[in-house]
Image: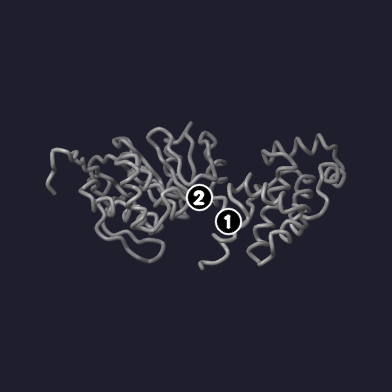
Amino acid sequence: MSITPHEPQIRTRRIALVAFDDVTLLDVSGPLEVLHQANRGGRRYDPVLVSPRGGGVPTSSGVTLAGTIAAAEAGPFDTVLIAGADHLVDRVPDELLMAVGALADRADRVASVCTGAFVLAALGLLDGCRATTHWRHAQALARRYPAVQVEPDALHIASGKYVTSAGISAGIDLTLALVEADHGAEVAREIARELVVFMQRPGGQSQFSAALATPPVRSDPLRAVTATVVADPAADHSLSAMAASAALSPRHLTRLFQSELQTTPGRWVERVRLDRAQQLLLDGHSITAAARLSGLGSDETLRRAFARHLNTTPSTYLRRFRATG
């Protein structure tokens, strides 16, 4: 490619995509495709598949990634991107920790897709940082690594040299953001057009959550209250009614909600009702019926709950999630 006097020299950035046994394939292939598209405008990136031992790497879908380079032989990189896998939530293999630790120490930027954040957190690299991961595993990340400020509704978050993303396909969103940081919005926009994806996906990943993930509660009275609300969200769940059913004072019940669920009784009940309303809408109920049957009451109350918790409207949610058509 010839460089005219008016065309800036493009510096090729070396990027390590870290894979390992049973890695999620799309966590690797999604970012790799974004980088491939970025190189259509010049050699902007040199992506390299890296693994702890090198050679072929079996993925969770059965496809094998061939020809990966062992981390110890890979040399320095501008950016290191760690893919995710379900098993990282339970345990991060020692060889993966050693490989990523060595690579990250010499990189200018370190990113993770989905549960790849568990690798960075296990190394202590996310201590004091804002981070995210797949919505299903956000609570586990926060519980296991309390020094990490986990933000479960984000699609991707940059905190210093570390960038983390939500689940699986959000690796594409993440890599577009990295390209935009390196080469500007227009380059990233052209890639997004080619891949037929959003430059900035509307809403956070809470819109994709299939059910309200309530952490387990320790106290018997609170456990009974929450189970009653989930069983029948449309019933009377005012603070006074819930306190009376648990034989507690409203003040004591409020303290239990704050200490165990980190929220207020009213806000928690609203979230349960919103979760039920989401399912009712997907089941074919009208907005008015979903509001009434979920306990939210009116169309306007339902709209306010959607805006507050999901950053969208009921009608937009329906268009996005009811069917592919």
Earlier in the chain: of badge 1 and badge 2, it is 2
Compute the Cα span from label 1 to label 2: 10 Å
Residue 248 figure quarter:
top right
Label 1 environment density (alpha carbons within 10 Å; few <14, some 14–19, many ≥20): few
**Residue 39: x, y in percent?**
24, 51
Residue 202: mark in rendering: 2
**9 relative position to 154: left or right:** left
- Tag 1–tag 2 contact (CB < 8 Å): yes
Work out which residue is located at the far front of the displayed protein and give it.
6
Q: Amino acid at mark 1?
A: Thr
**91 relative position to 25: left or right:** right
Residue at horizontal 36 percent and vertical 53 percent from the top: 192
**Residue 80: x, y in percent?**
32, 43
User: Looking at the picture, does residue 170 appear above or below residue 318?
Assistant: above
Q: Amino acid at mark 2?
A: Pro
Residue 15 figure quarter:
top left
**41 relative position to 258: left or right:** left
User: Looking at the picture, does residue 168 appear above or below residue 9?
Assistant: below
Q: Dot 1: what SS?
A: helix
Residue 27: mark in rendering: none
Q: Dot 2: what SS?
A: loop
Residue 180 figure quarter:
top left
**Residue 43: x, y in percent?**
20, 48
Q: Which residue is mark 1?
A: 316
